[in-house]
Each structure stands twice: as C-alpha cells, then as structure tokens.
Amino acid sequence: MSNDLTKPKSPVPAAPAQDAGSRLKRDMLRTSIDRMFGKKETEKPPAPGVPRVLLAVANHESSPGWGYAKGRVRWMFDTAAGAGGLLMKFGCWGPDNARGVRRLRVTKHWTGDPGRMMGLMDRSSCDCGCFVHVRGLLQQAVKENADRPMRAVIIIGDAFHDSEESLYEAAIFARELWRAGTRVFLIQHGGGPATRHKLEWLARVSGAVFLPFDPMTQERQFLTMWEAISAYAAGGEEAVRATSGPAAPLLLEHFKQASMPVIDEGVGAREHVRVNRDIKK
C-alpha cells in the first residue's frame, strides 16, 4: 500500500441496529411531513470552486472492475480539463481489522494530476472479496465534506457485506451527502443479488444513483454511463445534458428520483420487514 494512502481513524462503534433504524426512520418521517406541507426536500447546488470527487473501488485488484476504474480515471480528468479541472481522492479496502472487516484506505491529499492518481492506483492493492462495508466509505465521505462539499462520491464494487445495522448507518450518511449537494453513485460491477438488494434499497432511501452492470455483457453500457458520470463530475447536470448518447438522459432521470418518503410508501413495519429480507438474501 502506498504511503500516500492512510487508514481513516477508526469510527465510533455503531449504535445498535434498532437505534440506527429509528434514526433513519425519524429522518425520513421529517421528510414526508415536509412534503405533506409543501416543503420539498431539495439538495444544495454544487459547491463553488474546482469540483472534488471521491472514487472508491471495492473490486479485487485482479478483477475487471479494478481495471476499468484505472482505465477511466484519466478519461474523467480529461473531461474536466476544459471545464476548469477536477480534484480527486482514491479509496480502496486493505487487510482485515481486529473485527475481521476489511479496512478502508483513502488517499491523504486531493490531486488534480491524472498521472499521479493513476500511479497511486497502480501502487495500491485491494484485498477485497469478503466483509467489505459501504458504510465506512460513506462515513468518510461525510468527513471529507466538512471543508467543502464534493461534487460526487463514486463507489465501484461487486459485493458489499453490510449488516442491517451497517446498512441503516450507510443510509443516514448517504442522505447527509445528498443534502450537502454531493451525488452518490453506487456502481455494482459484477457480483450477486444480495449486494444488489442492499444497494437498490440504499439508493431508494437516500437519493443515491444505483447502476448495476454485468462485466461480461455490458462493457459498452458501462463505458457510456461512465462518460455521463464524468461529465457530471466536471460540470454538473448542465454538462450531462450537453452529452450525447443514451446514458445522459438515463442519468438525468436518476437525478429526478427523490429519496423514498415514509408515509407515501409505507416505510415502517412493512418496509422494515422487506429490508430485513433483502439484506439477508
């Protein structure tokens, strides 16, 4: 692992699952009440200045997902070059911690140099494959936003192993990022239905964008969508609208989807049961 990577400080142990679920439910209930009284939940406009993006890869380093990520980072920087540039941090998962969970590693400094970012990725290694949690990355993203909100958080992975407790916490962090004007992209590149259920639910309750791809049959679709995501990272929604191809309108449709309201869709006992079932699949 490169010296440019550092392990974020160990997070405070998560509250019991019921507490995390209750906090999420209260947050969503407030959103629903606001909607009932005509006060819509709206995200903030993009932060001024050079846009910042946190890219994290949870695929094993020998997998297609890791290779695609490395191959497309320069493309994202090139897209942003004509719009004032881009700053990026990179995250991956290293060896297990004491609890048997893969440790998140994130670069210390923002860089606008694509060559440097590619070098960091080349010198990094990802020991993923089991017990990788998306929660930790979203929590770290909230911390990164403390200075100035990022334009986007892009997570590419094939499998995540968050428990019910961890997934509720992840949803709380993802909703906080959305309110700050930071788009969260959850890209499942390979993997199975268990992770798909988790990421679909996480996107529904937080306003994140979930995009599943089969690396064996959907390479072109992945690259086309990456072009649209790169346009967003460089210039926001206006840049996406100016992008040709089928992925741009699809991405814009994702942006229109608000986080799932509690009252309108019955989040409560029924949703709690459904989430439990999805998580355990």
Image (cartoon, grey):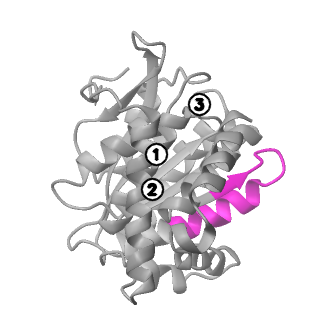
Relative vertical location of residue 38 with respect to residue 134 in this rendering, above or below:
below
* Along the line of sight, the residue nearer the viewer: 181 or 170: 170
Relative vertical location of residue 191 with respect to residue 152 in this rendering, above or below:
above
* Along the line of sight, the residue nearer the viewer: 224 or 27: 27
Tell me, for residue 21, which label it has, or none.
1
Identified at 84% across, 51% down, the residue is: 217
Tell me, for residue 25, which label it has, or none.
2
Q: Which residue is mark 3?
A: 161
Identified at 36% across, 63% down, the residue is: 182
Per the image, is 63 magenta?
Answer: no
Residue 122 makes an appearance in the image = yes
Q: Position of residue 205 (x, y in %)?
A: 52, 60
Q: Would you identify the image quadrant in which residue 67 lies? A: top right
Residue 118 makes an appearance in the image = no
Q: Residues within 10 Å of mark 2 (few under 14, many from 20)?
A: many
Q: Residue furthest front?
A: 269
> Nearer the viewer's eye, disc 2 or disc 3?
2
Per the image, is 216 magenta?
Answer: yes
Q: Residue furthest right?
A: 217
Identified at 54% across, 79% down, the residue is: 256
Instruction: Magenta stretch: give its range.
Output: 211-229
